[in-house]
Image (tube, helix red, strand yellow):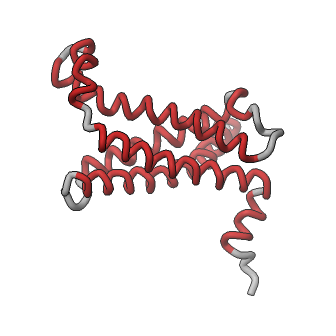
Amino acid sequence: MSKTLAFIKKEFLEMLPPTIYFFVVFHILMFSRALMIEEYGLSLDSSFVAVIGALIVGKSILIADALPFVNMFRSKRLIYNLIWKTVLYACLVLCFQFLEELIPLISKYGDFSIAVGNFVEETKWHKFLSSFILFLLFLVIYNMTVGIMEVLGRKKFLEIYLGSGEK
């Protein structure tokens, strides 16, 4: 039983930082989307979507990082791994964004093939692309931060950014 609890605790603690980061990112994206369509404030629905999105992305990053090909540039300069991971994660984000746009269309038309046929015409591409660009920016920031933390070590990284605690 203690091995199981230790495993769950380890997984939870590994998932917590990216989940919190992307929780904030999704709320920023939801707020910017609301501003684009001249709605002010966040509804409970959009906050729920942000929470679910953060949980999905947080766990997806942990799963992706466990795959051997994700870290194939680990022995190279940091920029290679940064670009590689950003491209991989951006592809995942695009898949999720396409699903986010497609699911309401499937619900509207009741048929997958009809929904796909109307996807191009009914997608609000300015909203889609602006959300993707913002998310891409936040992915780069996330990957840079994680890369620097891996090089420096967690303790040194936190000491540099937050101070040593000694006065």
Location of residue 28 with respect to 3 vertically, above or below? below
Residue at 25 percent of width and 38 percent of height: 124
Q: Nearer the viewer, residue 55 or 106?
A: 106
Location of residue 69 with respect to 143 vertically, above or below? above
Task: Specify the quadrant of the image occupied by residue 154.
Answer: bottom right
Residue at 62 percent of width and 41 percent of height: 11
Task: Specify the quadrant of the image occupied by residue 102.
Answer: top left
**Residue 146, x across and y down, in percent:** 67, 51
**Split into 4 quadrants, where in the image is the N terminus?**
top right
Compared across the picture, whether 117 is left or right of 27 comes to left
Location of residue 77 with respect to 119 vertically, above or below? below
Residue at 78 percent of width and 64 percent of height: 156
Compared across the picture, whether 41 is left or right of 11 comes to left
**Residue 86, x across and y down, in percent:** 59, 40
Compared across the picture, whether 32 is left or right of 154 comes to left
Q: Nearer the viewer, residue 51 or 11?
A: 51
Which residue is situated farthest in the bottom direction here?
167
Residue at 44 percent of width and 33 percent of height: 94
Q: Nearer the viewer, residue 123 or 145?
A: 123
Task: Specify the quadrant of the image occupied by residue 27.
Answer: bottom left
